[in-house]
Image (cartoon, grey):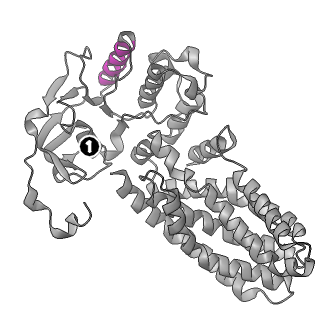
Amino acid sequence: MIALLTRDLKLAVRAGGGFGLGLAFFLILVALVAFGVGPESALLARIAPGILWVGALLACLLSLDRIFALDREDGSLDLLATAPLPMEGIVTVKALAHWITTGLPLVVAAPLLGLMLSLPGPGYLWLFLSLLLGTPALSVLGTFGAALTVGLKRGGLLMSLIVLPLYVPTLIFGAEVARRGAGGLSVEVPLLLLAGITCATLALLPFASAAVLRVNLR
Amino acid sequence: MEMKVTDLAVARGGVPLLAGVSFTLAPGRALILRGPNGSGKTTLLRALAGLQPPLAGEMSFDREAVAYGGHADGLKAQMTVTENLAFWAAVHGLREIGPALAAFDLEGLRDRLAGTLSAGQKRRLGLARLMVTGRPLWLLDEPTVSLDTASVALFAEAVRGHLARGGMAVIATHIELGLPEAEVLDVGPLKAALPAAQLDDFDEAFL
């Protein structure tokens, strides 16, 4: 398991691994929004939590199709399936590697980009926390989508269409935490709901992903 | 551990390919699968490896004993020869990759990126992977593709060494491997009859 994680991390940072792509996309998206809306800091401050959350979500989506497609192409997936690792473990490690290479950099970068959108002072902590809690769910849900479409050529768009609706609850409560935090309101309820969604996806989806992967390998 | 397969039937994409495949393989023995293209050798090997369920029949052997080697080698182009091999060794809970490198004459290529290897060198690395799985039953699909004569001899030597240690091998191949002691199973005559009526309406909707 640890060998698989270190291999995936190693591959991500080597040539063509795609590490940083999501981060760069996030940066550009936020910059474009700032340019598009114009220098009205009051308006920017109001939409900042939502924009940052949508940006993080889209950046996450960008690298999802790589999770299984490359392993499928070079035959590693067949070999991993016959290896002594349980399939549920493989998909969990894959999701974890995706989170470390995509989700975690977004969590760290988001407060910095919040500055660009003049996010109000108390919002930074809650934006950081909500992304930290929410992005693991994005990776796990994305892994499920990637497992569903692994055998398809050009399955990336189909995967986006499957995965994006699944991201809605995480987005609603994640952005709500950041919005309320920025407005100085109580964040307890959306924060708990966000944590609940993440825990539920972490607990249930690896089994679903493993099952569809087994079917797709046939 | 003996490998016993009784009346196995396999299908690919909903089309039955083989039926009534039966054989027994004792430790230290190898089985060569022969048959024309499209006769179902790959499908049979994938079923034996547990990658797809058989239509019918019984397989009695330990699934954890299987090391599968398909058409693709499972190599990462951005990792070196050593890293690739060490990864598969670690996945199978082993550390030692020296003997595998030596057996397939890869020692001079240790630090080369797998992406820069020639097709034959990649295949040798893919076959060396079998030796770091530590598993007794090798299921190999066309293992000699893109290998030169000298490498085929290396491969035959590795298989013989594996059998001598009590291992087993099922190999689908078209060429002469130089393993006269191996049993041969021709899957050509085992072609399944096409039972068109077996598909019900529900399945048909998805085919």
Of A131 and A168, nearer the camera is A168
Query: Is residue B64 rendered to the left or right of residue B42?
Result: right
Q: Quadrant of residue B68?
A: top left
Q: Is residue B189 magenta?
A: no
Tell me: residue B197, above or below residue A127: above
Residues in magenta, as a range: B151-164
Residue type, label 1: Leu
Label 1 packing within 10 angstroms: few (<14), some (14-19), many (20+): many
**SS type, badge 1:** helix
Residue at (87%, 63%) from the top-left corner? A112
**Residue B112 in sight in this render:** yes
Q: Please give the residue where the numbered disc 1 appears in the rendered image.
A: B48
Q: Position of residue A32 (x, y in %)?
A: 80, 64
Q: Quadrant of residue B108?
A: top right
Residue at (44%, 50%) from the top-left corner? A153
Q: Position of residue B103 (x, y in %)?
A: 44, 17
Q: Main secondary structure of the magenta part?
A: helix
Q: Is residue B163 magenta?
A: yes
- Outermost residue toward the top in this view: B150
Query: Is residue A34 rendered to the left or right of residue B18?
Result: right
